[in-house]
Image (tube, helix red, strand yellow):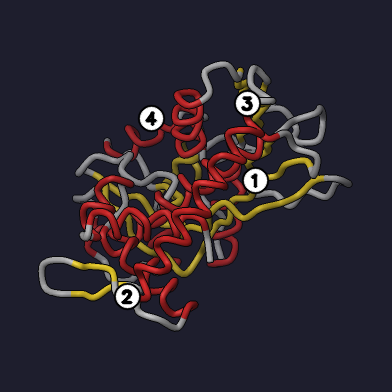
């Protein structure tokens, strides 16, 4: 049983409509429906009576709603009390990947806690200085450091829509080996992924353009200057209609977020929002 499930349940109970709840939380209706179905399966009871145009609480759902409402009010009060004592602090973030999702979280967090300063760093080695949160796909080992899975996403081939590979149901290693590649710079996550995927397919990529600017990479693909291996969720919605994404094997990337075991309440609140934002992005990506 997760807080996000209970949040969806409470809102859906008030709205008597899964679609309106989904719209409020900016997720697909299926994400709300599946979340509540998992909750019902865990409880072994039907919480809603479903009809063609609306849903309404069952008798068991009404009793559950009363208890959950009271519990969530207590949790909200406890969180606000903890955060109140820590207002005006600072959060230091080291962001190696998934910058878009992290910055969306920064925007949400800053609106809620404008007194908290957020310092973001993009090229500092993760264990070189004290940091509150580290977002990376590397496995880090350090005493007192906790790791949480942030999201796992497919690695897909980005190619111009009128390119011959765009129409292929399956892309062979020989076809891919003949293409020029566009990639982020050395020591970046995508550079390493590109090298590993291509090596697994039996060839070394011919990288013709390297850049740390995601906009420049996307523009080069749109211009037909090469192809690129990109993470499906992190880069969701970032390409124009001139670019399509195609599967090449079953390659995936997992992003981790690290924090200290003694993290402050504001850091834990940021982490909660970050994991919530990642779950929302994953649900949206699955709808595509």
The CA distance from mark 3 to mark 4 is: 39 Å
Image quadrant where residue 97 sits: top right
User: Would you say residue 34 is visible in this rendering?
Assistant: yes
Q: Position of residue 185 (x, y in %)?
A: 57, 34
> On the rendered structure, is 51 left or right of 235?
left
The residue lying toward the viewer, choosing from 35 and 223, is: 35
The CA distance from mark 4 to mark 1 is: 24 Å
Location of mark 2 (residue): 59
Task: Name the residue at 28% across, 45% down.
Answer: 24
Callout in the foreground (1, 3): 3
Callout in the foreground (3, 4): 3
> On the rendered structure, is 221 left or right of 143?
left
Disc 3 or 4, which lies upstream in sequence?
3
Location of mark 1 (residue): 257
Mark 4 in CB contact with mark 2 (< 8 angstroms): no
Location of mark 3 (residue): 84
């Amino acid at each position: 049983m997760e807080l996000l499930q209970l949040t969806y349940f409470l809102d859906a109970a008030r709205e008597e409509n899964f679609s309106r709840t989904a719209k409020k939380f900016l997720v697909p209706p299926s994400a709300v429906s599946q979340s509540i179905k998992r909750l019902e399966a865990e409880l072994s009871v039907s919480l809603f009576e479903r009809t063609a145009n609306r849903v309404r609480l069952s008798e068991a759902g009404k009793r559950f709603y009363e208890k959950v409402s009271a519990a969530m009010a207590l949790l909200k009060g406890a969180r606000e009390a903890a955060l109140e004592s820590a207002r005006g602090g600072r959060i230091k973030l080291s962001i190696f990947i998934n910058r878009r999702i992290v910055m969306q979280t920064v925007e949400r967090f800053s609106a809620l806690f404008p007194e908290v300063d957020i310092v973001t760093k993009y090229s500092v080695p993760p264990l070189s200085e004290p940091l509150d949160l580290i977002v990376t796909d590397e496995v880090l080992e350090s005493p007192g450091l906790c790791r949480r899975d942030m999201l796992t996403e497919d690695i897909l081939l980005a190619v111009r829509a009128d390119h011959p590979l765009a129409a292929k149901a399956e892309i062979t290693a020989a076809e891919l080996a003949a293409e020029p590649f566009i990639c982020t710079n050395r020591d970046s996550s995508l550079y390493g992924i590109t090298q590993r995927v291509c090596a697994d397919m039996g060839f070394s990529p011919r990288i013709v353009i390297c850049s740390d600017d995601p906009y420049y990479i996307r523009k080069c693909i749109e211009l037909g200057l090469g192809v690129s291996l990109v993470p499906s969720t992190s880069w969701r919605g970032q390409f124009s209609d001139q670019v399509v994404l195609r599967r090449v094997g079953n390659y995936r990337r997992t992003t981790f977020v690290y924090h200290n075991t003694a993290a402050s309440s504001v850091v834990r609140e940021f982490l909660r929002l970050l994991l919530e934002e990642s779950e929302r992005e994953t649900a949206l990506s699955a709808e595509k």
